[in-house]
Image (cartoon, coloured by chain):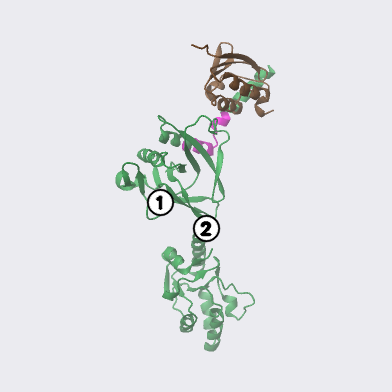
Amino acid sequence: MAEEKIILREFKVLNKYGIHARPAALLVKTAGKFTCDIFIGRKGAEVSAKSIMGLLTIEGHHGSVMHVRIVGDDAEEALAEITELFENKFFEE
Amino acid sequence: MAITLKELLDSGAERLSLELVWGEGRLDRPIEEKAINRPGLALTGFFQYFAQRRLQVFGLAEFTYLKSLSTADREARLRGILEKNVPAIVISRNRNPLPELRALAEEYGTPLLRSTMITSHFINECTLVLEELTAPRDRIQGTMLELMGIGVLLQGQAGIGKSETALSLIGRGYSLVADDVTEVVRTNEGRVVAFAHELTRYHMEIRGVGIVHVPSLFGVAAIRREAMLDIVINLHPYTNDAEEDRTGIEPGSIEVLGIKFPFYSLPVSSGRDMANIVEATALNYKLKMLGHDAAKELDEKLIGRFLRKTAG
């Protein structure tokens, strides 16, 4: 059986207001497009990136570092889109 | 859009205490302007400006003035008005038409109507009736319900379960206004009133069951003749990439008769109790109208907390 693809990354939250409702919704929408499982959070306390209520609990304020773990076949594609969101400050200030 | 005298009588005769004195065969005449005119100045012989496309109302003032004239003058002045081919003449206060007026109406083929109302009341009420008859209207696809004072239009492709969802909501005590096809009219105040076509009113079609009569099955509390539209809810098949609003902070909007309404698109999939979700959507909208926006408040709480953490 082929090994499941796992990607681990760290991202700094760059936008001023952090991962509040709008960025959380963007993450959920993006994650929902892929079949792979995507987890975001702090070390030892991660939530599914497909759960908006989960994302609101990780307290991703400005300057905090978020661990991202992606497991599944389309992990590379998912990583590319999630990277884009973090790097572009979720398209806000 | 001009309406005919017949349309005015059909929908307004009772409200306006209006009866036809003469002109049965002339009811297809259009009323081209929806305002109403009192022809006082025209009766004095002034025709440089005369609103001849409007209904002409003869009240106490006009009658008293006409009676002060000689028979010949009276006939001539009235002829001056009827010559203009006015849509119809209405006599208020239930007075009998003067013989000259009656004769001239027949001569020019101008319908003659009579109302028991006093002139000012008639003018107010008739203006409202004319406004309603000429208001922008449309017939749109969708099932209209009333939930706790919130008018909800349920839309979605055929077979998605609009009527079935409506049925569940009726079972919970809410009211049906129209099934599948809803008539809408814009009011002067910029709101939209929704109701059913009179032929199908209070009926709905449930797949596999057929056409049912809602008040016979659920009682008269289950129906409403009309409701103001507040929100539009669309049911769509569940997909992974649909553009749904995941936070409810920025709901979409949709235009009905040129007026914007909040628009919520709800995904349908097995196991989702749509009636429950439609109910929650309407309740949440009501809460927002009361000034309590749960999504926004939670977001503000989060942002406040994040900003403190960033600073600390």
Q: Is residue B296 on the magenta stretch? A: yes
Q: Which residue is mark 1?
A: B225
Residue in view at x 35 percent, y 42 percent: B207
Which amino acid lies under the numbered mark 1 shown in the image of this protein? Arg
Disc 2 crowd, CA 10 A, few/some/many (<14, 14-19, 20+): some
Secondary structure mostly seen in the magenta stretch:
helix
Question: From the viewer's perspective, is residue B241 above or below residue B4?
Answer: above
Q: Foreground: B305 or B181?
A: B181
Q: Colour of chain B?
A: green
| Dot 1: element | loop
| Dot 2: element | loop
What is the C-alpha distance between the residues marked 2 and 1? 18 Å
Question: From the viewer's perspective, is residue B107 above or below residue B260?
Answer: below
* B152 horizontally vs A38: left or right: left
Q: Foreground: A10 or B9?
A: A10
Q: Which residues are magenta?
A: B282-297
